Every structure is written in structure tokens, then in C-alpha cells.
Image (spheres, rainbow, N blue to C red):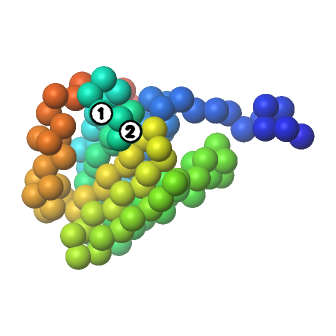
Amino acid sequence: MTTSESSVPELDGLELAQRCVDLALDKKALDPVILDLREISTITDYLVICSAQSDPQLKAIANGVVRALKDDFDRKPLAVDGFPVSQWIVVDYGDVMLHIFHEGKRGVYALEDLWNDAKKVKLPQAA
């Protein structure tokens, strides 16, 4: 069976970013945002940023996203970098980069301020 014949659905960048948000929320992530960088950067198309309330939750969010995207879409990250001292984990899918911060550190690194010229993608309302 070739990849094109596979029953695994393909995700475009925005769909992948939205799926990252959904999966992070499944692990009780706080304040998720999606920033659209397509017109202002070549580093990635979308940044997904969210917060966790503890170090175990930080790891659970990252592991949950990675596992679900692999199982459901056969999508593996290019890299997962964890910074235990900084309380920040980055999951890099190329076209989407997921940044998970301990809630006390998110403001310190201030990615939303750094990328304040990026468009925010409107998230669907929670049911």
C-alpha cells in the first residue's frame, strides 16, 4: 500500500495547529493561541503556544500531542526539545511549532510579544 492509498488523513498546517490545540486542551492546557507566521517568517507557518500548571502537566501535554498525532495521522515531530530548567517544551513539526510553557514562565519568554505582528488565528469556542 502506498502512502497515497493509505487511510491516514493528511493535515495541512492550519489543521495541524488546530489539532495541537485540541490535544493540548485534552490535557487541560491553559490559554492556547495560534499565531500565523506565514507572511512574516520562514521559520514555521504556525506557532501554537499554551501553558501548563506543573512540570508533570507540561510533559503530559507534549507526550499527549506527540502520541496522538503519530497514532491518528502518522505524523512524527522533527524534534522535541525540553528545557527542564526553563520549564518550556518545543515540539517541532516543521510547518507548526508547539510551545508549551509552565504558566509562570510564559510571560518571561513572551513569544506572543516577540511575534506581535503575527495574525492570531481564531479558535473555535469550547462546547
What residue is shown with label 2?
44
Q: Which amino acid does label 1 sit on?
A: Ser
> Quarter-wise, where is residue 112 in the image?
top left
Q: Is residue 79 left or right of residue 102?
A: right
Q: Which of 11 and 2 lies nearest the eye of the viewer?
A: 2
Residue 81: % across, % down: 39, 65
For the point 30% across and 70% down, the residue is 83
Which secondary structure lies at badge 2? loop
For the point 24% across and 25% down, the residue is 119
| The C terminus sits in image quarter | top left
Q: Which amino acid does label 2 sit on?
A: Thr
* Residue 126 visible in image: no
Q: Is residue 4 left or right of residue 72?
A: right
Do tag 2 and tag 1 residues touch (Cβ < 8 Å)? yes
Furthest residue in direction bottom, as rendered: 85
For the point 18% across and 46% down, the residue is 111
Vertical side of 57 occupied by 111: above or below: above
Residue 71: % across, % down: 65, 52
Which secondary structure lies at badge 1? loop
Residue 47: % across, % down: 33, 40
* Residue 118 visible in image: yes
* Residue 41 - label: 1
Q: Distance between the residues labelled 2 and 1?
A: 7 Å
Q: Which of 42 and 21 lies nearest the eye of the viewer?
A: 42
Vertical side of 85 occupied by 11: above or below: above
